[in-house]
């Protein structure tokens, strides 16, 4: 499943061979928070691209919940070699690594594609909410981490069909640019990756796990054209999900208070975040590019260190 998510996260364009002019290093940071910060974590990632090779170095730390104060950093390094058709996952602490053929990912994608999501005689479940969506471009330019960006914002408001007091709001904001240095090298690399996987087009869900994907689906394809207008290279993407009312509201609030009291014993005293109209934030995500460097990267960055043992 992890490798299917990896395939879903790569940026896809029409299949082409790699024609990179230089090496590129991209630095990103990501954050996730549940209600009152529960389950929160931050990730700092440095991605190195050199022709048909890449290396992703991620450092993740828990920031919320009972373990928020005691959270330890974990490091995840993944080397992808399109030239060898291999992916290596490195365990930095134990100095071990595993090897995965890219062909295996292609096989899993084909199996997933052929498998029906629901039985043929069963219709997909209908949403409990009636949704109204609005997507618009934000006026003007905004400088984000040194990049000149244009933005779009989407809002989806849902009302429970059986209980009008049960409301949900999803706010999705995208800031992108078409002037990022190294963009062509990245596009060339991911086009080659797509070609190796045998796909012509694949919708990116960068930085989203299954839980956040279900909320972004409310916007359907409304973002596609607006993203092109804003600048299709993403610099900052945020999403917030808020909720109010409903028969489970009282129970949720009591549970939140209990978790806050227990979390305080571990140094986590974050309060429930509410909007001006009384809606409670149940989750939020933030992904942004903090820098792009354009210059030579040593070939050793894309090799398994000699003192690592294969598992």
Image: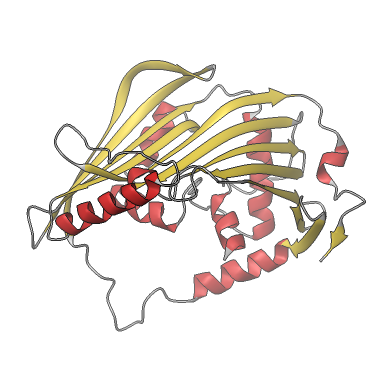
106, 32: nearer the viewer: 32
Q: Which of the 4 quarters of the picture holds residue 117?
A: bottom left
Q: Is residue 299 left or right of residue 194?
A: right
Disc tally is 0
Residue depicted at x 17% and y 60%: 248
* Nearer to me, 98 or 188: 98
In percent of the image, x 17 and y 31: which residue is there? 276
Residue 84 percent across, percent down from the top left: 82, 55
Residue 122 is at least partly visible in this image: yes
| Image location of residue 34, percent across then percent down | 37, 48
Q: Give the vertical position of 112 relative to 279 (above or below).
A: below
- Is 2 drawn above or below residue 263 in the view shown? below
Residue closer to the observer: 21 or 262: 262
The image shows residue 42 at horizontal and vertical percentages of 52, 40
**Image quadrant for the N terminus?**
bottom right
Residue at 13%, 54% in the rendered image: 166
Task: Say which residue appears at 64% left-offset and 42% top-offset.
Answer: 59
In the rendered image, is residue 81 in sight? no
Scheme by which the image is coloured: secondary structure
- The single residue placed furthest to the bottom in the displayed view is 121
Which quadrant of the figure has residue 107? Answer: bottom right
Residue 24: % across, % down:
71, 30
In the image: residue 137, left or right of residue 274: right
Q: For the C terminus, give its image quadrant.
A: bottom right
**288 to the left or right of 265:** right
């Amino acid at each position: 499943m992890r490798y299917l998510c990896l395939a879903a996260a790569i940026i896809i364009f029409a299949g082409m061979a790699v024609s990179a002019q230089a090496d590129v290093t991209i630095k990103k940071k990501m954050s996730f928070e549940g209600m009152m910060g529960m389950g929160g974590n931050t990730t700092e990632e440095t991605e190195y691209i050199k022709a048909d090779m890449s290396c992703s170095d991620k450092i993740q730390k828990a920031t919320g919940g009972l373990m928020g104060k005691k959270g330890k950093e974990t490091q995840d390094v993944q080397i992808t070699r399109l030239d060898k058709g291999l992916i290596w996952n490195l365990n930095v602490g134990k100095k071990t690594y595993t090897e995965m053929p890219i062909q295996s990912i292609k096989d899993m994608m084909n199996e997933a594609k052929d498998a029906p999501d629901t039985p043929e005689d069963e219709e997909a479940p209908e949403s409990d909410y009636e949704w109204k969506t609005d997507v618009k471009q934000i006026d003007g330019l905004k400088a984000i981490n040194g990049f000149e960006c244009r933005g779009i914002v989407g809002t989806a408001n849902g009302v429970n069909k059986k209980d009008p007091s049960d409301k949900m709001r999803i706010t999705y904001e995208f800031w992108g640019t078409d002037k990022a240095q190294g963009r062509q090298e990245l596009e060339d690399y991911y086009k080659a990756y797509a070609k190796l996987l045998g796909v012509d087009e694949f919708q990116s869900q960068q930085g989203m796990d299954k839980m956040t994907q279900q909320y972004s689906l409310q916007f359907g394809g409304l973002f596609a054209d607006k993203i092109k207008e804003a600048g299709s290279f993403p610099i900052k993407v945020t999403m917030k999900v808020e909720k109010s009312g409903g028969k489970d509201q009282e129970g949720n609030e009591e549970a939140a208070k209990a978790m806050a009291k227990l979390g305080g014993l571990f140094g986590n005293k974050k309060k429930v975040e509410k909007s001006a109209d009384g809606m409670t934030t149940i989750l939020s995500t933030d992904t942004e590019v903090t820098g792009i460097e354009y210059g030579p990267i040593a070939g050793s960055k894309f090799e398994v260190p000699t003192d690592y043992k294969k598992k």
